[in-house]
Image (cartoon, helix red, strand yellow):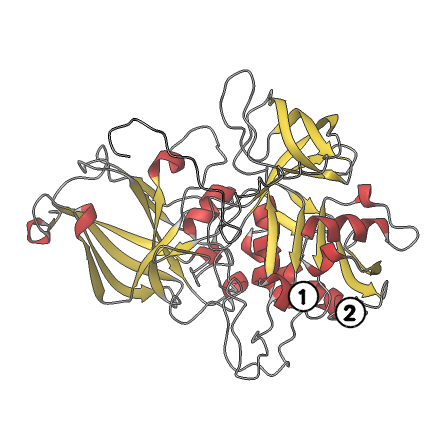
Amino acid sequence: MAGTGAVPTAKPPSVLSSPSPTKMPPPRPPPPQPPAIARTLQGRLVRWMTYPNPSGGLWMLNTIDGTSYRLPAQPVDSATGVLIAAGASVTLTCYASSTQRNVCLSIANARAPFVAASTQSTANAALRVLVMVVSISTSSLSCPARPAGTTVQDVQNAFLAPNGSAEFFRNCSYGQMVLDRQALKVVSTVVPCSASFLSCDEDAIANATLSNLPAGIQPEMFTHFVHVMPKDFLSICGYFVRAELLGSRSWLTADLPNQGIHFSASRHDAKKYTPSGLILAEGKGIFDKGSVMQGLLINYGLYPAYSGGELFNDSSTAMGDGRSCPSAPELSSLGWATPLAQLNSSNFREKVYQPYTLRATYLGPAKVMIKIQPDWLKSYTKNLYLALRVKAAGDLDLNDQFSGKLNIHEVNKNIDNLPVATSDNPERSFLQVVGPRSFAILSEYNMIILVGDLVDSGTAIFLKICRFTFGSYECVDSPP
């Protein structure tokens, strides 16, 4: 009855009502991880260059006993807090998994007592190269045998035949860096297959290859190690050449010119397919002297070349996508060649043409380029290099686009001007070519370059250079 204050009795729950939600059991904890094993390592820090991102890549420590350890990141000096550069001698603590002995899950206590140089010395360098032609044996039903992509004799011919890699190095360096023909050794190695091979783990390939060398081969007798990948590894790895920056190892494919290819694929853009799914390649890898030089010079600390903002895209040099000698700024960095003139605001008069007769780079090593430091600019960020390239000697296979013309390259001045070498990337980049009886106005540098005729039977070129304030119309010839 209303107003009596009686409390109604609760209705019994219906058998059709939803049951209260059942409390879920807590998630299972992850399985225990194997304890990390602490190891103190000492060795040389190297970086594997990656395409298309040169600032990425893998960091490795090649220890003094010949073992390589993969690091989780670029190490930081524990005393200074500064990133340690490739090429440095490093001591660190590696915390490795018991299941991945050569992989450091984390690192600590890194120290680098000596500053790493940007390049190793190329003065009177004789490279003792061990080339390993790798094939894979059957080790399980899921891993069929993969034969080598080539033969020991073919690889040896690629190094020692006329216009091969050995002659290429001697010509390009003017005899300052050679491949020791007597020490060169090409061997066949058969390695059991593993999952790391089929995922293109180059470090695993290198370690397994060295563990299966023919009897009598002593790795300590060699300075550099070239691994020629088995057949079909181009489709797995996606490149023709990979190398350690300031290290000693490189990996190349074994693609032959007669494998049905009809265009020149970039050696760092390997994954181009026909409608049938076959990869296109044209004599790249171990049979491309430019690829061999690129790998070995990356080992010496020389970065790959740019063009149009793209890494490896400069076809005028082996450090890009060419089969010709290094460009002028690369020759300078290696110490192989010196400039005819080095211009800056202190010796480059404004509004007056300065004339030069510049010899082709193949006639070096002396006076075969012009280096320009445009410090008259409000924003001075890059140096310029001018050089005449001609199809001869090491440049015998120079692309016609560059031959008989003035080649212009840009370089990051902060690195190029340093009196002490560093392992930073100077971003050497092709800018343009200027043919005979032509000119180029470089507005961003307040400069004009007038190119005259080829002289001395086409081995030199006449040119005039002027810097201006507002426009090239200000430039005049210097009075007698």
Q: Where is residue 128 in the image (x, y as percent from the top left)?
A: 74, 48
Judged from this view, the residue extending furthest toward the right is 215
Q: Position of residue 136 (x, y in %)?
A: 80, 64
Question: Dividing the picture into quarters, in which one does residue 120 lie?
Answer: top right
| Nearest the eye: 461 or 398 | 398
Per the image, the residue denoted by label 1 is 233
| Nearest the eye: 53 or 134 | 53
Q: Which mark is residue 347?
A: none
Considering only vertical position in the picture, is 160 above or below 413? below
Q: Is mark 1 on a helix, strand or loop?
A: helix
Count how many numbered circles sit on residues in the image: 2
Q: Is mark 2 on a helix, strand or loop?
A: loop
Per the image, the residue denoted by label 2 is 146
Quadrant that contains the N terminus: top left
Q: Residue at x 49, y 62 (%)?
A: 321
Q: Can residue 372 be seen in this view?
A: no
Considering only vertical position in the picture, is 206 above or below 45? below
- Residue contact at pointers 2 and 1, CB within 8 angstroms: yes
Considering only vertical position in the picture, is 244 above or below 188? above
Q: Which of pointers 2 and 1 lies earlier in the amino acid sequence?
A: 2
Q: In this view, does 394 lie to the left or right of 469?
A: right
Q: Which residue is drawn at 66% across and 24% down?
A: 92
| CA–CA distance in space, label 2 to label 1 | 9 Å
Q: Can residue 114 be seen in this view?
A: yes
| Nearest the eye: 315 or 239 | 239
Q: Which amino acid does label 2 sit on?
A: Arg
Q: Position of residue 396 (x, y in %)?
A: 52, 68
